[in-house]
Image (cartoon, grey):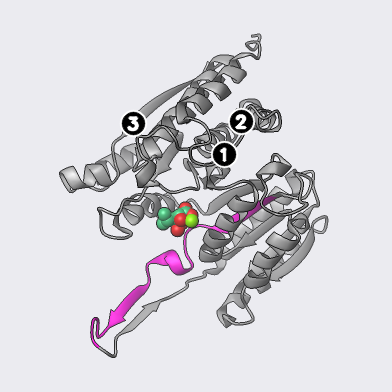
Amino acid sequence: MKEYEIAVIGGDGIGPEVTREAMKVLDAAAEVYGFKTRRTEYPFGTEHYLKTKEIFPEQAFSEVRGHDAIYLGAIGDPRAPVGMIEFGIIAKLRFELDLYVNLRPIRLYDERLCPLKGKTPADIDMVICRENTEGAYSGSYGYTHKGLENEVATQVMVHTRPAVERIIRYAFELARTRNKKKTVTMIDKANALRSQDIWTRVFADVAKDYPDIKTEHAYIDAACMWMVKNPEWFDVAVCENLFGDIITDLGAMIQGGMGIAASGNIHPGKVSLFEPIHGSAPKYAGKNVACPVAAILAAGMMLDYLGEKQAGARIEDIVVDLVRTRRITGVNTGDHPTDFLGNLVAGELRKVPARVG
Ligand code: IPM
Ligand code: MG
């Protein structure tokens, strides 16, 4: 029987609660599809930092990277300095494990979850491939005359050709595997941020290797507009880190909200990290009101990545079915108790007869 070693970081706020539900679903999937998971839980997050002053010790980090996959609930808490724990945990994992693909599917499961008038599941089914290792996140920033009247603050957007090329290539490969519009849209802002024409140029070069895939281009501002006006135009889209951060929150809203949007931070073939895209929502922590659907779908993406494709697809199918049949009436905070949703999905999963052999 296959066994997967998974490092689990519940993190801050609602992170541990939604993670618990996702792990229930993982256990049900393991039973039904005939594999095992061996999980190591790590306590890192703001609470742990406040108690111990430890963010993510190197020893633990090297242990974590030795797993088959990493699962993360959520990070962020106003009691720690802004960005400190986020960068010490999420960004550290993304950068040091070189998880260059931030894969963010945006799929509408049922019309009633969509705030856009007249859009149906047929219109909203896309994947954003967000570059996940550089851009404005690369850490190249600083201040001159800090605190003085003439203070200067800079944050450099770094785009290296290898990083640009590999994420673009990933997007083209992904478009091939999806039975959709076979289109990749390059989203950049090369008209105003001139250095970003590296994206436009590399995109054109890589496209030559994929004559079967159609290409489109949109500047980020226009892309935001199209996402709202004509989301059906998108299949696979690729963009730099910060634009991807922003447009995927918009994407989450058109698929029903932060409660349903999942993501993978991936380096193909290497240990990768899966997480809901929502934050830690500290004010809802411990109240059993957070929606764990995004966290559950992230566990499904993790299984897909680990090679348990049937189990991964089944988790998504179950959520789609539960939403469409209104057993899940909503995916916002408070629509259902957190544990109710985990139990519901795990229970549906167990209704499938166990795999023979
Ligand atoms: C995300 C988050 C992170 C990011 C934060 C928590 C650093 O917003 O995963 O989208 O900006 O990448
Ligand atoms: Mg974000």
Residue kind at label 3, given as amino acid type: Glu
Depth check, front residue: 77 or 36: 77
Q: Which residue is tagged 1?
A: 331
In the image, the segment drawn in magenta is 126-148
Q: Are marks 3 and 1 in contact (CB under 8 Å)?
A: no
For label 2, count other residues whose C-alpha is less than 10 Å away and answer few (under 14), some (14-19) or many (20+): some
Q: Which residue is tagged 3?
A: 41
Dot 3 or dot 1: first in sequence order is 3
**Residue 85, horizontal then vertical, whole percent:** 31, 52
Mark 1 beta carbon near ligand 2 (under 8 Å): no
Q: Is residue 140 part of the magenta span, yes or no?
A: yes
Residue 246 horizontal side relative to residue 168, left or right: left
Residue kind at label 2, given as amino acid type: Ile
Return the residue found at the far bottom.
150
Q: Which residue is tagged 2?
A: 328
Residue 253, above or below 207: above
Label 3, label 1: how far apart the Cα atoms are: 26 Å
Residue 212 horizontal side relative to residue 207, left or right: right
Residue located at (35% from left, 53% from top): 86
Q: Quadrant of residue 231?
A: bottom right
